[in-house]
Image (tube, rainbow, N blue to C red):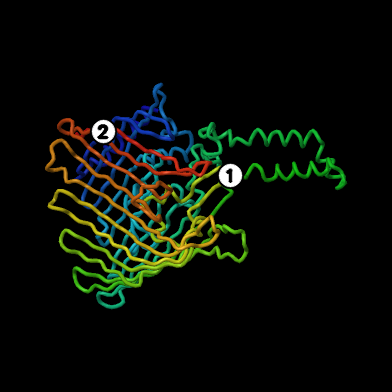
Amino acid sequence: MKYKIILFAVFFSFCFNQGKIDPTYMATFGSVTMNGKVYNQVSFRPEFTTGKLGIGLDLYIYFDEDGNIYSKDWDFSSFESSFKTLIDKIYYIRYGQPFNDIYFRIGALEKVTMGYGILVRHYANNMDYPQIRRLGFDFRYTFSDFRLEFIHSDLKEFSNAGLLGIRAMVPVIPKFDLGFSLVADLNQYGGLLDSDEDGYPDFVEPEWANDPNQWYQYQELNELHSNLFNDLSCDDEIDTGDTSSQVYQDCKDLEAILNSGNDVFNINNKKDIVSGLALDLSYDISDRITVFSEFAQLFGDTSNPLNDPSFDTNLGYGFIPIGFHMNFNSVSVFIDYRKSSENFIFHYWGKNYEHNRVNVSNYDIITKESLLYNYGNQEGTSLAFIANISKYLKFSVNYIYLNGKKWNQEILDYKKDKNNSFYSKFEVDTSRIPRIDIAEIFYQQTNTKKPFDFENNENTLIGYNIGIELADNMSLIFKGRKTFTLDSNGNYNAVKNTQIETLIYF
């Protein structure tokens, strides 16, 4: 295998050093946590740019404390696995910049917003990196002031994409634009981790998560049912049609179990789509001020907490009647008034979406869509600003304050309550700080009464990136991400993704 790795690196280096290519080479070594286990990491990360074209590769090897290589990332046993192995080594391919007439990026998508963000705001497909490497696609094309955008979160999982979006913006009159956006999660069950790709998620087969020949823990029970079926000669018993016989009834029960039991947790046989449609209008009052309005409707069904047929499970809508975007040199400000119906939340596809699109509690699969019944009619305001302070600090803050109703499990009805969200990111300009290359932290807490109480839930995201210069062209990088998932007792447990690596430029 090591020869294939070397040939792969040499091939790309040769190809991209032909002509006027400006290569940058980085090598890293350190540790990374994947699936709750710590691996040592060695990687080679060349980047190549020429004109508007840029390509970044990520050639890596993970090995455990026993020196065993994590071989899943270097699987050449078949054409399909070989293709996936090679594709995984592309961190990004980029042409142009988002403001250019033609722009695309394939690979890691770090911050994607459609329109003014009523449905998709700051979505990222790399929150699980390096445990999961998604091959996203962001394409934008402008001609005659008409603009087309296309987003796909992971081309490797085309039919299970967490985000598939298309947007068209049409100029109506000078300075007045009309935009349409269509967004979908093609299969929310695709968010469940299935390491061995056997159709059974890791949570139902923790001991055999990497063994496609062993599925979940009910396999032995299923074999027992099959043996009982044979021991009772159920084929003959059912053929007799003697419904009064207890053996007949037992055989019918066993038959039902055998016909359905294998597929209870097989996500290959499950599909749950949620989608949304958005319309936005904008008018440029001046070069610095834009006024906008935006409407969105979600399509799908939430859970029915009452099991009452009269309970409306259809997803709802959100509306921003008026909002303003203002640019003042180093400060950018967004402010708007918004309201929504029941079964709707703003920014459904947010930065943490790949973590909260589906969760598991006590073997119940819980999608984000199924929890929207918790939100009744709401209205309020949103204030966001991005600022650079004296070239030392860059920060972005967004606070959403909503009043309305939320579902109360004690009274089994809606009750007046607040629903607030807070997003923040702070970046330090390290050019004036000795030995510090990177310094940034971020935090978000959405759809909660008190976002500053730091009560963790599936919408909580905490992270940091710290880089310390060890010597010329050498830095020590610390990266951390923390999210939270439900356990069988209804408590939220931290899911940590940490990386410590030494980065060398040459």
- In the rendered image, which quarter contains the N terminus? top left
Q: Nearer the viewer, residue 22 or 151?
A: 151
Is residue 336 rendered to the left or right of residue 309? left
- Name the residue type under label 2: Ala
Residue at image location 34% in from the left, 36% down from the top: 498
Residue at image location 46% in from the left, 56% down from the top: 185
Checking the image for residue 266, the label placed there is 1
Q: How crowded is mark 2: few (under 14 residues within 10 Å), some or many (20 or more)?
A: some
Is residue 329 rendered to the left or right of residue 119? left
- Name the residue type under label 1: Asn
Checking the image for residue 440, the label placed there is none
Is residue 65 rendered to the left or right of residue 256? left
Q: Mark 2 points at which residue?
A: 27
Q: Is residue 250 above or below residue 343?
A: above
Q: Nearer the viewer, residue 280 or 304?
A: 304
Q: Nearer the viewer, residue 420 or 18?
A: 420
Where does the image place residue 167, in percent across and percent down from the top left?
37, 64
Snapshot quadrant of residue 97: bottom left
Are the residues tagged 2 and 1 within 8 Å (C-beta)? no
For label 2, the SS is: strand
Q: Is residue 459 visible?
A: yes
Residue at image location 35% in from the left, 61% down from the top: 401
Q: In this view, does 7 lie above or below 91?
A: above
Q: Is residue 296 visible?
A: no
Where does the image place residue 376, in percent across and percent down from the top left?
47, 64
Where does the image place residue 87, in percent across and percent down from the top left?
39, 42
Q: Which badge, 2 or 1, is on the more N-terminal residue? A: 2
